[in-house]
């Protein structure tokens, strides 16, 4: 077992309320419950010695391991190959089918021998509350119970367990065709103990979970050139969605570094208005109307609950249940992934001013008649009041999309999204005959547009730039043609694209911006941003540079991990960096694939 396996050497499993990472060595080294944003139970990925893990794997000195997903599902298969035999561990969680928040969650680890004889070893070392809470072990005939801080963790197996202090170990030898398994169930203290599992139970659960994911994926209407890549991204977005509210989290993890050994380590287990809003477009394009609609309802609820109150109608991010309180603190006792400290929980960026979120919110609300027509009058009233307020409040410096901590600026991207807020508000009001101060919104929209064209343009760079007081380029502006602010083949936009090619693109990979030229208040550097690379593909395809777009898209696929997942960034050696997997990357992949498919179809005369 590596102390810190590469970030990319993991697969994701989940039940639509929480999720776990499983390394290619068969180790669950990240799991928080009962929700995505709950304290961790297994967090060896952030502190090998004190974070906790659940390992199930052979210990053959000449063994190798491989991982894949069972086709069209979220069932992760880890295969172990050795001269003595081949074994598999199948990891999955029964998905939520009720839409009701639950404190009981089950991680199933089904084990079997495919060929020969395989000796599997088990270690279960939970560390509750980010490793801050002690636990007591009750070991009995039906398995082990770990009791800590109001939470019980039941470990049940089809083979014997033995005590190892307050943890447990176990071993089992399986021959060709034999199977068994491990079940780890988390629930509130005092909850009913789960029934002991049998081999038939494991097989039944496998069939049910497999059918759930295949039935869900059949709703996809994607018929393009990259079905496996797009559908894996869709499943990943589904896994990162909290079913009881429809809220999409930014990533399944916290604290994974943007630079190994650096301080850019954030908690991403919350719902950003921006990420969730842009996911609406991606999911609707694929035909997943239910998921898109659920997020829009969550978003409208945030507007309604602030109506009539002082201050900003929206904040940058929320907890998955809509709670706006996300205080940031540091886990001083965690050493961090390969020494990348501090490890933070919560996120102080929730208190930042990021004006672009109003444009992204309106973008989500206006995507498709399936959603827009469902808005209640109360919801429309809250939206209209928000735009009335925003007409007087858009022209302010803010922290911007990248959540810089170096002071507020007049960010061009924030202004572009402000334009989008008014433009889409006008479209909604006119399309559905809703009461609105159209003249006020139109005047604000036109003022934003004129300001961006005058102050967001750099004659020196012959490009739109990051903010009004500089000449630094910013890859967030790759969204300008996608949202309709500028025509994708406008001379000013093509010149901007050329400038980005020179300054931000490295071997087809795209940096967000240059922190040395535009200090963001943080030490260290970062890798290329995978979201931006897929936005670059989209922009190239729209601009008619289709061959370049396709080559960039195909090249980007080599940076996916072995099961098709992407973290936030790609490091200088091609390694994945940042929280994993990242929703923003996968939704931008979907949008890039769809745009590129259309451009290639047009070239082919289809």
Image: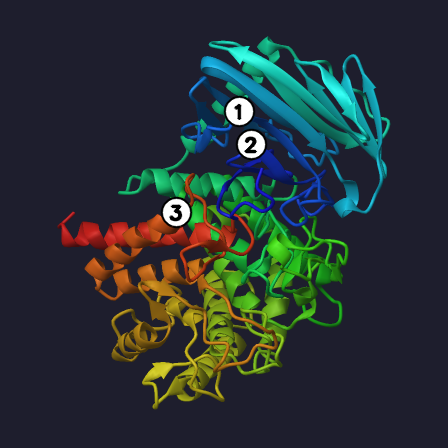
Say few, some or many: other residues with alpha carbon within 10 Å of mark 3 (under 14 / 14 to 19 / 20 or more).
some
Secondary structure of the residue carrying tag 1 is: strand
For marks 3 and 1, give the CA distance: 34 Å
- Point out residue 316 in the picture as x, y percentages from the top left corner: 63, 64
What residue does disc 2 label? 26
Q: If you read the primary sequence from the N terminus, does the residue marked by circle 3 or circle 1 appear first?
A: 1
**In this view, the mark in front (3 or 2):** 2
| In front of the other: 592 or 54 | 54
| Sequence-first tag of 2 and 1 | 2
Asked if marks 3 and 2 touch (Cβ < 8 Å), the reply is no
Q: Which residue is mark 3?
A: 285
Residue 525 image point, x, y percent: 52, 70
Kindly indicate the quadrant of the structure image that contains residue 17.
top right
The residue furthest front is 61
Q: Is residue 324 visible?
A: yes
Please tell me which residue is depicted at 47% across the width and 10% down the height of the picture.
176
Q: Answer with left or right where residue 499 lies relative to residue 34.
A: left
The residue wearing badge 1 is: 89
**Looking at the image, is 236 positioned above or below residue 344?**
above
| Above or below, 200 relative to 479 | above
- Which residue lies at the image location 34% right of the left edge and 69% below the top edge? 505
**Foreground of the two, 150 or 358:** 150
Q: Residues within 10 Å of mark 2 (few under 14, many from 20)?
A: many
Tally of marks? 3
Q: Are marks 2 and 1 in contact (CB under 8 Å)?
A: yes
Depth order, front residue of 464/287:
464
| 405 sits to left or right of 160 | left
Measure the alpha-carbon separation of dots 2 and 1: 7 Å
């Amino acid at each position: 077992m590596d102390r810190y396996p590469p970030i990319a050497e993991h697969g994701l499993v989940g039940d639509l309320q929480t999720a776990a990472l499983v390394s290619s060595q068969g180790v669950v080294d990240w799991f928080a419950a009962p929700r995505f944003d709950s304290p961790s139970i297994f967090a060896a990925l952030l502190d090998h010695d004190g974070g906790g893990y659940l390992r199930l794997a052979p210990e053959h000195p000449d063994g190798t391991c491989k991982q894949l997903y069972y086709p069209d599902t979220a069932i992760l298969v880890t295969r172990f190959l050795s001269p003595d035999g081949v074994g598999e561990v199948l990891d999955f969680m029964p998905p939520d089918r009720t839409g009701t928040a639950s404190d009981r969650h089950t991680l199933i680890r089904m084990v079997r021998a495919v060929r020969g004889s395989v000796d599997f070893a088990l270690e279960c070392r939970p560390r509750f509350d980010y490793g801050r809470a002690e636990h007591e072990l009750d070991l009995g005939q039906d398995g082990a119970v770990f009791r800590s801080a109001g939470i019980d963790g039941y470990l049940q197996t089809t083979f014997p367990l033995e005590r190892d202090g307050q943890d447990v170990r176990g071993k089992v030898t399986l021959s060709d065709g034999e199977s068994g398994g491990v079940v780890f169930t988390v629930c509130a203290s005092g909850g009913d103990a789960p029934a002991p599992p049998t081999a038939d139970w494991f097989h039944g659960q496998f069939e049910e979970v497999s059918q759930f994911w295949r039935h869900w994926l059949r709703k996809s209407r994607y018929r393009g050139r990259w079905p496996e890549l797009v559908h894996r991204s869709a499943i990943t977005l589904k896994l990162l969605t909290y079913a009881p509210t429809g809220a999409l989290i930014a990533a399944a993890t916290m604290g994974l570094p943007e630079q190994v050994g650096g301080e850019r380590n954030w908690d991403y287990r919350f719902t950003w208005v921006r990420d969730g809003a842009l996911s609406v477009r991606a999911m609707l394009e694929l035909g997943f109307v239910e998921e898109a609609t659920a997020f829009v309802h969550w978003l409208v609820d945030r507007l309604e609950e602030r109506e009539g109150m002082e201050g900003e109608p929206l904040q940058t991010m929320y907890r998955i249940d809509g709670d706006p309180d996300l205080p940031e603190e540091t886990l001083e006792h965690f050493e961090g992934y390969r020494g990348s400290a501090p490890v933070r929980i919560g996120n102080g960026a929730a208190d930042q001013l990021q004006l672009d979120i109003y444009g992204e919110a309106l973008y989500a609300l206006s995507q498709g008649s399936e959603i827009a027509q469902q808005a209640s009058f109360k919801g429309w009233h809250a939206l209209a009041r928000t735009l009335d307020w925003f007409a007087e409040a858009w022209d302010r410096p803010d922290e911007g999309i990248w959540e810089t901590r170096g002071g507020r600026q007049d960010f061009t991207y924030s202004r572009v999204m402000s334009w989008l807020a008014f433009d889409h508000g006008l479209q909604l009001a006119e399309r559905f005959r809703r009461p609105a101060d159209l003249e006020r919104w139109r005047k604000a929209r036109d003022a934003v547009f004129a300001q961006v064209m005058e102050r967001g343009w750099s004659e020196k760079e012959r490009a739109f730039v990051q903010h009004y007081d500089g000449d630094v380029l910013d890859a967030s502006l790759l969204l300008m043609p996608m949202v309709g602010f500028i025509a994708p083949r406008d001379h000013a936009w093509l010149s901007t694209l050329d400038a980005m090619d020179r300054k931000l693109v490295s071997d087809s990979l795209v940096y967000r911006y240059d922190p040395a030229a535009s200090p963001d208040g943080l030490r260290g550097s970062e890798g290329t941003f995978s979201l931006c690379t897929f936005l670059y593909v989209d922009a190239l395809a729209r601009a008619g540079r289709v061959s370049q777009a396709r080559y960039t898209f195909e090249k980007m696929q080599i940076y996916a991990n072995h099961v098709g997942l992407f973290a936030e960034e790609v490091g200088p050696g091609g390694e994945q960096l940042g929280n994993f997997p990242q929703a923003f990357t996968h939704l931008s992949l979907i949008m890039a694939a769809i745009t590129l498919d259309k451009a290639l179809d047009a070239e082919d005369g289809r």
